[in-house]
Image (cartoon, rainbow, N blue to C red):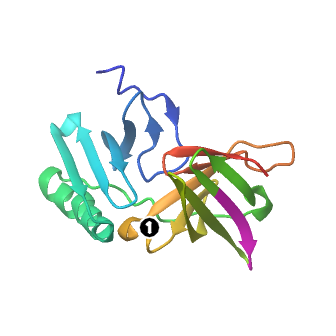
Amino acid sequence: IDFMMERQIDKPSRRYGDAWCMGPAYANWNGIDVWGHPGGTETALTFMHWAPALDGAIAFAVNTSSGVGPFAEVMFTEVLEEAFGCSKPSFTEPDPDLKPIDHARYVGKYRKIDRHIDVKLEGDGLIATYTDNYFGVFYKKTALLKPLGRDRFLVTDPDRQGGYPSDTAFFGEDDQGRAKNMLENVFPTSRVA
C-alpha cells in the first residue's frame, strides 16, 4: 500500500491533485496529505479520497451531470470541514503573480485516441474546441481557457459536468517554444499541429 501511495510524478493541473502515484493522486489540502481517485463519464462523477493523518475518508457519486458542481462544492468544503476540520483548496484562482501569456505557446491541435482539441486565439483569449468520439458518434463543445499561471488554465464551460470547475495545463516544449502536450482532465494529449 505504501508503494501505491508514493508520489511518482507531479502534475501541472490541480483539479484531481498535485501528483500521481501508482494508482491514486496525491494532494495537499491546506497542510493535510490526501490521496484519492476520481472516476466518471460524461454524465456522472465519482470521488474517493482518504487522509491517513485524520483517519478519515470521503467518497461520493453524483449520477446526474447537472448536480455535480453544487454537490461536489458542498462535499469538499462544508462536509469535510464539519467532519475533519479541513477542506479541499480552490484550484480556480489565478496565481498572485500571474503574468501576461504568450498565446502562440498554446495555439494548436492536440489529440488522444477519442478526443481532438483545437486551441485557437479569439480576440485576446484562448478558445478550446473539444471533439469527442463516442463509439463513432461525434460531440463537439467549446470552452474559454482563462489563464491561471504556470501553463495552467481554468476551463470555463458552464455545461461541463454540471458546472464543476475544471483546469487544464500545457507542458513540454518544442523547438519553436510551443507546448508539446495538453493535460485534459487526467489524460495527456499530444500536439499534432
Residue appearing at x 43%, y 73% in the figure: 159
Q: Quadrant of residue 62?
A: bottom left
* Residue 95 visible (yes or no): no
Q: Foreground: 38 or 50? A: 38
Q: Residue furthest bottom?
A: 123
Percent across and percent down for residue 59 are: 21, 48
Residue 120 sits in which quadrant? bottom right
Question: Percent position (x, y) of residue 20?
Answer: 45, 35
Decide which of 36, 91 is in the foreground and name it. Answer: 36
The region drawn magenta spans 117-123
For label 1, the residue is: 160
Where in the figure is residue 14, as x and y percent of width and height? Answer: 47, 51
Rendered view: 95 above or below 27: below
Left or right: 150 in relation to 180 = left
- Residue 42 visible to the viewer: yes
> Furthest-left residue in view?
83
Which type of secondary structure does the marked residue at label 1 adopt?
A: helix
Q: Is residue 190 left or right of residue 178?
A: left
Say left or right for 60 vs 114: left
Secondary structure mostly seen in magenta is: strand
Tell me which amino acid carries mark 1. Arg
Q: Residue shown at 20%/63% (left/top)?
A: 78
